[in-house]
Image (cartoon, helix red, strand yellow):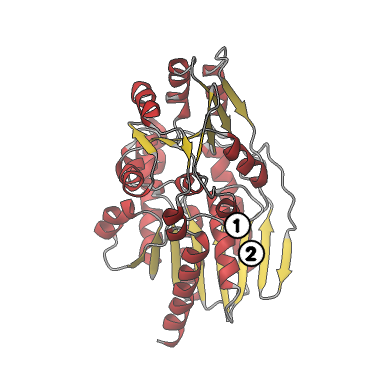
């Protein structure tokens, strides 16, 4: 039996989708199943290079990494990249037979590719959805571009999710959106989690954080979704006498953020780094910073960054609303939440934090990626068995 796995990102790429899919494959490979993974050569950040073979065979896992045209973070470039992935993946699967298709997707089009292949092959489809792409674009886009693209994207979304036999949603905040539109689909709730590297780096005991000035760190994508350009310039001015801010990452709003922070001596922008270097950066920080733009769609999401931040035991300062806000308040100790874009609220929230590093053992145990992906792999195996023998 051969299961097709589609993921736009896979190791050694640096992003949540890559980490999630890689961990899942590590669990699926332990079962009596042949796995064919179609992904891309590392491309998450234009400024970070990681080599990987185009074709890789390891026991029961075959990985195809397709090359993409050069692209940045703009919508046109991303559309070209996805179209290239779509066409190359379609060629790879043309003469293959599968028992099922699994696709993990945040920007819809990988899920759409999975739906197209599953229907052509006449096999069941299991989707892992990490974001509500159409809902997000409905707020981000405006004017002629929205009028030109949104109706087509809505059609693609309907086609994709109606084709799925089972859908996993990484955030409980997605529940109403999906259940109201696609009520006849079977849903699962395997969230993001904490990878072994972060668990190994978790503190074993409590210690005070005494850096002067205080070191605040953000690491991740710098795009419209994160809205750092709407909070960091003003927030950095408010904390200029007590804190310095480091931002590690890249993305579509990085240049704007760089321009807006010009002349601010307590803000440092750094390029993406390897995972080992990232963990070292987390360890050297005093406070870990998280922010999402003030869009209604983002009140449904649960950022993967929360999980790795929490594992490191540092105080967390988070500008989020909706489901993410509730999740942090209910599950993460020594974390303060403020309204997105509110620099005054961020300053006050910073003052409420306890400047200590402390283990969050219960949280780490509950949200270990190993256990979550083990449960998800078992669910996929059961799904394959049900659909092919039921």
Per the rendering, the mark at residue 87 is 1
Residue 148 or residue 348, whichever sits in front: 348
Name the residue tied to disc 2: 91
| Residue positioned 27% across, 57% down in the render | 181
| Residue positioned 49% across, 14% down in the render | 241
Q: Where 183 sits versus 268, above or below?
A: below
C-alpha span from label 1 to label 2 = 6 Å
SS class of the residue under badge 2? helix
The image position of residue 6, as x and y in percent, is 55, 62
Badge 1 density bin: few <14, some 14–19, many ≥20, Cα 10 Å: few
Quadrant housing the N terminus: bottom right
The image position of residue 32, as x and y in percent, is 59, 82
Name of the residue lying farthest toward the left: 180
Q: Where 322 sits versus 18, above or below?
A: above
Quadrant housing the C terminus: bottom left
Q: Quadrant of residue 60?
A: bottom right
């Amino acid at each position: 039996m051969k299961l097709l796995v589609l993921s736009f990102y896979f190791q050694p790429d640096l992003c949540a989708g890559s980490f999630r899919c890689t961990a899942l494959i590590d669990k699926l490979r332990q079962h009596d199943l042949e796995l064919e993974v179609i992904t891309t050569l590392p491309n998450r950040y234009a400024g970070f290079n990681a080599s990987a073979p185009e074709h890789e065979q390891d026991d029961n896992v075959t990985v195809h990494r397709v090359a993409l045209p050069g692209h940045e973070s703009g919508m046109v470039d991303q559309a070209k990249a996805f179209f290239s992935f779509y066409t190359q993946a379609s060629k790879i699967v043309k003469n293959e037979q599968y028992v099922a298709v699994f696709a993990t997707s945040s920007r819809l089009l990988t899920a759409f590719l999975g739906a197209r292949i599953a229907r052509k092959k006449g096999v069941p489809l299991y989707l892992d959805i990490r974001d509500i792409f159409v809902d997000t674009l409905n707020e981000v886009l405006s004017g002629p571009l929205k009028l030109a693209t949104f109706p087509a994207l809505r059609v693609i979304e309907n086609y994709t999710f109606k084709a799925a036999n089972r859908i996993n949603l990484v955030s409980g905040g997605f529940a109403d959106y999906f259940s109201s539109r696609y009520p006849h689909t079977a849903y699962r709730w395997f969230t993001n989690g904490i990878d072994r590297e972060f668990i190994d780096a978790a503190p074993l005991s409590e210690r005070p954080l005494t850096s002067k000035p205080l070191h605040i760190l953000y690491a991740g994508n710098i795009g419209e979704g994160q809205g750092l350009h709407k909070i960091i310039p003003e927030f950095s001015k408010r904390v200029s006498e007590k804190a310095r801010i480091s931002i590690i990452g890249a993305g579509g709003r990085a240049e704007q953020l760089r321009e807006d922070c010009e002349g601010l001596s307590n803000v440092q922008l750094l390029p993406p780094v390897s995972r080992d270097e990232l963990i070292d950066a987390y360890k050297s920080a005093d406070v870990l910073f998280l922010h999402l733009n003030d869009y209604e769609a983002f009140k449904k999401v649960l950022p993967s960054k929360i999980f790795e931040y929490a594992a490191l035991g540092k105080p967390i300062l988070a500008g989020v609303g909706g489901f993410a806000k509730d999740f942090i308040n209910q599950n993460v100790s020594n974390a303060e939440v403020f309204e997105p874009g509110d620099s005054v609220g961020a300053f006050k929230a910073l003052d409420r934090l306890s400047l200590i590093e402390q283990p969050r053992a219960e949280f780490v145990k509950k949200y270990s990626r190993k256990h979550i992906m083990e449960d998800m792999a078992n669910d996929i195996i059961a799904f394959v068995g049900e659909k092919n023998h039921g």
